[in-house]
Amino acid sequence: MAQAEEEGFNQTELGVTRNKIMTAQYECYQKIMQDPIQQGEGLYCNRTWDGWLCWNDVAAGTESMQYCPDYFQDFDPSEKVTKICDQDGNWFRHPYSNRTWTNYTLCNNSTHEKVKVCSNCELKSALDFKTAQ
C-alpha cells in the first residue's frame, strides 16, 4: 500500500510540475509575441524559451541571470540561472552537444548540503525517495 501511495504522490507531483512548466511556456510565448521587437543598435540574442525559463532579448557579450524555477523539489529558488549571449549575438552553445545551453547547475548544487543540516524536512524525504528509485 505504501508503494502505491508513493506512486500516486509521484504522479500528482509530476502533474503539478508539468502544469507549472506548461503554464510558464505559454506565458513566455505570449510575451515573445507581444513584446516590441528590439530597436536598439548593435547585436543581441533573441528572446527565447529554454524549456524551463523565458529569456528576454540580451545585448551581445552579456550574461543574463534569473532565479532558479521552483518546478523541482531539489531546485533552490534563491539560486541563480545564467544564460550567456556571445559577442556575435548568439546564445552560448554547450561545447559537447553544440546545443544552446542555460546554466542551471547552481539550482541544485548545494541541495544535498542543505539536507545535511535539515532535520526531518520535506526536502530530505523527497531526496531520499528520489535516490531510492
Image (tube, rainbow, N blue to C red):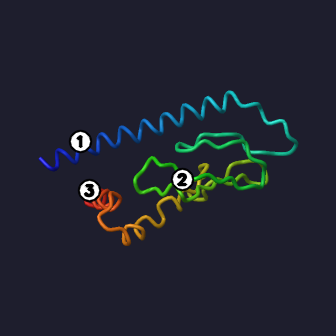
Q: Give residue 133's mark.
A: 3
For residue 6, side relative to residue 32 (left or right): left
Residue at image position (29%, 59%) is 125
Cα gap from disc 2 to disc 1, whole angstroms: 26 Å
Residue at image position (65%, 32%) is 31
Task: Decide which of tag 3 and tag 1 comes sooner along the chain.
Answer: 1
Cα gap from disc 2 to disc 3, whole angstroms: 25 Å
Q: Return the residue at label 1.
A: 8
Disc 2 on helix, strand or loop?
loop
Tell which tag, 2 or 3, sits nearer the viewer.
Answer: 2
Cα gap from disc 3 to disc 1, whole angstroms: 15 Å
Q: Quadrant of residue 86?
A: bottom right
The amino acid type of the residue labelled 3 equals Gln
Task: Decide which of tag 2 and tag 1 comes sooner along the chain.
Answer: 1
Disc 3 on helix, strand or loop?
loop
For residue 129, side relative to residue 89 (left or right): left
Residue farthest toward the left in the current orientation of the protein: 1
Examine the rendered structure and indicate whether residue 38 appears above or below residue 59: above
Q: Give residue 68's mark.
A: 2
